[in-house]
Amino acid sequence: MRLLTHNMLSCNIKGVTNGFPLRLEVEKFVEKEVEFNSDFLKNMFVKIEWKALVNAARSMGYEELPEEADSSMLDSDEFLKKFHHALLELHLEEGALICPETGRRFPVNKGIPNMLLHEDEV
Amino acid sequence: MWYLCVFFHRLLDYRRAEVEALADLFGAFQEEEDGNHSLEWKLPEHHHPDCPFHFVNLPSEQIASNIAKRSILVKGIYELWGEGSSYEELEEAIKNYPDDQKVPYLTSESTFRIIVDSFGKALSFQEQNERIQKFAYIPFKGRVNLKNPDHKFWVMETDDYGSSNGLPPVVEKRIFFGREIGAADRKLLPTYQLKSRKYLGPTAMDAEMAFLMANQALAAPGKLVYDPFVGTGSILIAAAHFGAMTMGADIDIRVVRDGRGPDCNVWSNFKQYGLQMPISLLRADNNLPPWRSGLKEVFDAIICDPPYGVRAGGRKSGGRKLLKGVIGPYTVPDDKRIDHIPSTAPYSLAECVHDLLDLAAQMLIMGGRLVFFYPVLREDGSTEPYFPEHPCFTLVAVSEQILSFRYSRYLLTMVKTGLYTKEIAEKAKKMHLDFKENHLKWLEEGNLHSAVFSPADCQTDGPGEFKSNNDLKPKYRGKYV
């Protein structure tokens, strides 16, 4: 699971209002090289919750992202490369996503987050 | 400018729709001020709309070439030099075609070849040669190169068809002569054919259809395409082939996570063709999508083949007995929460399509496309099928594929033309609860499986009536293949 996915997901248990961002529990992570596409990054930048991305990257041991970011920084290649790396190249392979409100654990195995709810959470 | 567009005699309903979509992708409508997004079409005189020969008005040769090369169903797009009902008439027409259009392609530095083709009958090698000889009156100065010519010229005859393939007979034979501008790369299809794909499921999308869907969705580099019923990834593979970033979800974790082992799963399918891996695969329920609130307009297109309960049924969260009311709500004990396998309930088509439209309305960018299959029973005879509607979407293409005597599936292409407002979100939420409360009612209403598979005599009063209903629909070979 890449951090782009993490940035889009929340806990959707019935009644939960602050299900985002999910906390990362990292057992194993990998880095995989991905083709760089600056147009895609620029499109995505406005959709991203920056703070959640910074914290998620940090829990995977990547500290290079600036605390704050705005669209003027998209002109910098250096920034784009860091953004690209954090968003697309860091993968959570084994671990879990933890709901900040209820502590519900959504397991991540073989890189696939399991977001299905139990019967009593629907 | 008008071009001759010749199609493969397949998937008849999908052909013009594909060209229209690709015209949009390659910017044919950029200069239209009134927001008009459709092409002008004409048919040769006395020809039936299902025949392979069509004329289409396109803004430039570059766009025509781009469309033809990217398409799956266009046999070729041609600059027409002449047409006629006989070779004498054709000669007349070619001679009258302006020289300044012809001369640049007849020069001594360029190579060329002439290809003879016919629709509805086969021509022997000798017959083809005789026809080529007739064009001696065109002042070709270049050399012939059969393998790799600079310019390809096509002679196409529409002889005799009607007798052999079920199309209404042509009143008048027609011969076309034109210069090829572009043609589909059908080599894609054997490369991607399902029988050589490693990981397959029972409802994997046929490669040709998957490419058509990706074309309807305008898949292209830099775009993000989502499939909420990803299965083995057969639709996303086509989108990835055209350079799009892909993302998929499925409720069945065995399919998205495990596949049939480390070298036979959704990832390995992408690897097999050297495609960019999906951005994300996850297990999620389309009925209760896990996207954070406030997330909107992220996908450029959503393409899918929803489970409609004929070959595979949909599932959603919540136990079957729970939703039926047979058992009351219960709590999973804490010590059993880890590794608990949540039960799921059948997911009716009506609810599934409602959820899909609502998700798409929220998650697609403005102008983004939703492309999906929708099943329709054919017993209803001549009545126009009803398609799902949504205030945010405009239906731009409808293409039927007849699957059996009983039912067809329609590929629907919708463009997001309205913003997803609070009111629409409220309404969707109410509908969501309504579906949950009346779970059983919806399941019964949308039961396609029994309509498609039950014995014929239960369906109608007598076999005679059944037959007459069905005759209302045309039954060409091309509609089936």
Image (cartoon, rainbow, N blue to C red):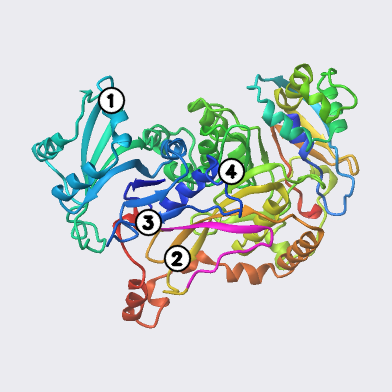
**Do marks 4 and 3 share a chain?**
yes
Q: CA distance from mark 3 to mark 2?
A: 37 Å
Question: Residue at the spot x=61%, y=62% of the render?
Answer: B348
Mark 1 vs 2, N-terminal side: 1
The alpha-carbon separation of the residues under discs 4 and 3 comes to 38 Å
The amino acid sitting under disc 4 is Val
Which amino acid, by three-letter code, is at mark 1?
A: Pro
Amino acid type at mark 3: Lys
Badge number at residue B149:
1
SS at mark 2? helix
In this picture, is B267 found above or below B387? above
Residues shaded magenta: B384-401
Indicate the amino acid at tag 2: Val
Q: Nearer the viewer, mark 3 or mark 2?
A: 3
Point out the image quarter for the C terminus of chain A. bottom right
Circles 3 and 2: CB atoms closer than 8 Å: no
Q: Circle 3 sits on which residue?
A: B42
- Mark 4 vs 2, N-terminal side: 4
Q: Viewer-nearest of labels 1 and 2?
A: 1
Q: CA distance from mark 3 to mark 1?
A: 30 Å
Label 4 to label 2: alpha-carbon separation = 24 Å
